[in-house]
Amino acid sequence: NAGVMQNPRHLVRRRGQEARLRCSPMKGHSHVYWYRQLPEEGLKFMVYLQKENIIDESGMPKERFSAEFPKEGPSILRIQQVVRGDSAAYFCASSPLSGGARRGTDTQYFGPGTRLTVL
Amino acid sequence: KQEVTQIPAALSVPEGENLVLNCSFTDSAIYNLQWFRQDPGKGLTSLLLIQSSQREQTSGRLNASLDKSSGRSTLYIAASQPGDSATYLCAVSSGNTPLVFGKGTRLSVIA
């Protein structure tokens, strides 16, 4: 069973360009989380998605950032008009379940991350 | 709002020593706590997950304890090896909320 896959692993963009980060969850997982790790900082939650639904986007900046998890294909985190402050490692995690009956038992499995550098 | 603190921020020990990493959290209403390992430029590897009803979990040379009422967890590493050098992250889950991470402890084990 392949783990969580993210691509690209490294992405370089100039200020003002768009960045698209992709995440393929583990097989059988229908929940995806995106986290951002700024230099010398801990991981911060950005957005939580199920297939075709955004469940919680409280950690995502209101402007320039968007995320989707379509019925088919990977989850996409899009950053428009990137700025130098967007340079960070972006991690995706997946889990088979959200809260509900088995709340607290679902481990999140992390991908290797995409390291975005904005010049 | 949940906050997670890890002490120390960095630690350097000689090979063979036993060591303890500390994690504290402000809201004791958690569902589980996880310890992760992160190697430079790499992703996160889950080491141990402790459910809120448990007090400890063990895997090989690693032992993690949880005291929910006091908002603390420790990761004990026995007989440290140079290959243990990495950043260790603690994260808590409060059910439907996403994981809240500490900033990590950067461990160096010197041969």
Image (cartoon, coloured by chain):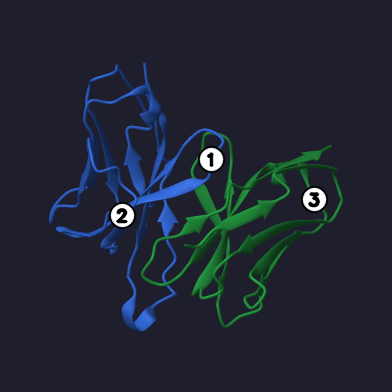
Q: Position of residue B42 (x, y in %)?
A: 51, 38
In the figure, what tint was chain A given? blue
Q: Which residue is mark 3?
A: B80
Chain letter for mark 3, please: B
Q: Position of residue B69 (x, y in %)?
A: 64, 78
Confirm whether residue B60 shows in the render.
Answer: no
Q: Which residue is mark 1?
A: A41
For badge 3, the amino acid type reads: Ser
Residue A8 quadrant: top left
- Specify whether A10 is left or right of B3: left
The answer to whether marks 3 and 1 mark residues whose Cβ atoms lie closer than 8 Å is: no
Q: Amino acid at mark 1?
A: Glu
Q: Marks 1 and 2: which is nearer the front?
A: 2
Quote the CA–CA distance across marks 1 and 2. 19 Å
Host chain of mark 1: A
Q: Label 2 belongs to which residue?
A: A58
Q: Is residue A86 above or below residue A71?
A: above
A71 displayed left or right of B69 = left
Q: Chain of mark 2?
A: A
Which residue is drawn at the image coordinates 55% and 78% (left, top)? Answer: B52
Cα–Cα span, label 2 and label 3: 39 Å
Tell me where residue A119 appears, x and y as whole percent.
36, 16
Q: Tell me, what hue is chain B?
A: green
Question: What's the residue type where badge 2 is placed?
Answer: Ser
Q: Quadrant of residue B5?
A: bottom right
Residue B64 visible to an observer of this rendering: yes
| Residue A116 versus residue B26 in the image, above or below | above
